[in-house]
């Protein structure tokens, strides 16, 4: 079975380091609960894509997810959507290959 890699860039416009850290840990814990092959924070500094728009907020990290097949993808998107809706100051850029989906609390 082929493995797919998904890149998640998580941003919070909060300003509070403690709540930012708590949000980071929560989303990582929730993703791990989906029993994906791997859920890891990227260890390298990430440059925003050339076409991306810069805005307010703190990039709390980039998660690299590895999953077998696409069965978990709807669960991942639903989890991220719920995470964003919990607070309007959150944004996620979900990348699979060259395709990117951006979810925000305002959308």
Image (cartoon, rainbow, N blue to C red):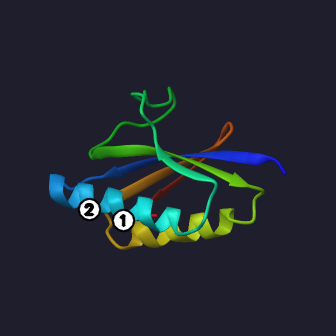
Residue in view at x 75 percent, y 59 percent: 70
The label shown at residue 63 is none
Category of crowding for the residue at label 1, using alpha-carbon neighbours closer than 10 angstroms: few (below 14), some (14–19), many (at least 20): few
Residue in view at x 33 percent, y 43 percent: 59
Q: Residue furthest right?
A: 1
Category of crowding for the residue at label 2, using alpha-carbon neighbours closer than 10 angstroms: few (below 14), some (14–19), many (at least 20): few
Residue in view at x 58 percent, y 51 percent: 38
Q: Where's residue 80, x and y in %?
A: 49, 64
**Where is mark 1, residue-wise?**
26
Residue 75 relative to residue 93: left or right: right
Residue 67 relative to residue 64: left or right: right
Residue 62 relative to residue 60: left or right: right
**Where is mark 2, residue-wise?**
22
* Label 1 element class: helix
For residue 35, above or below residue 63: below
User: Would you say the residues marked 1 and 2 are in contact, meaning their CB atoms lie under 8 Å apart?
Assistant: yes
Can you see residue 80?
no
Q: Which of the two residues, 35 or 89, is positioned nearer the viewer here? A: 35
């Amino acid at each position: 079975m082929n493995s797919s890699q998904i890149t998640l860039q998580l941003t919070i416009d909060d300003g509070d380091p403690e709540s930012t850290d708590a949000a980071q840990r929560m989303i990582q814990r929730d993703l791990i609960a989906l029993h994906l092959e791997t859920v890891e924070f990227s260890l390298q500094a990430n440059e925003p894509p050339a076409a991306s728009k810069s805005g307010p907020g703190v990039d709390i990290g980039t998660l690299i997810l590895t999953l077998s097949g696409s069965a978990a993808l709807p669960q991942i998107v639903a989890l991220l959507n719920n995470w964003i809706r919990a607070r309007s100051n959150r944004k996620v850029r979900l990348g699979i290959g060259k395709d990117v989906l951006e979810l925000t609390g305002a959308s």
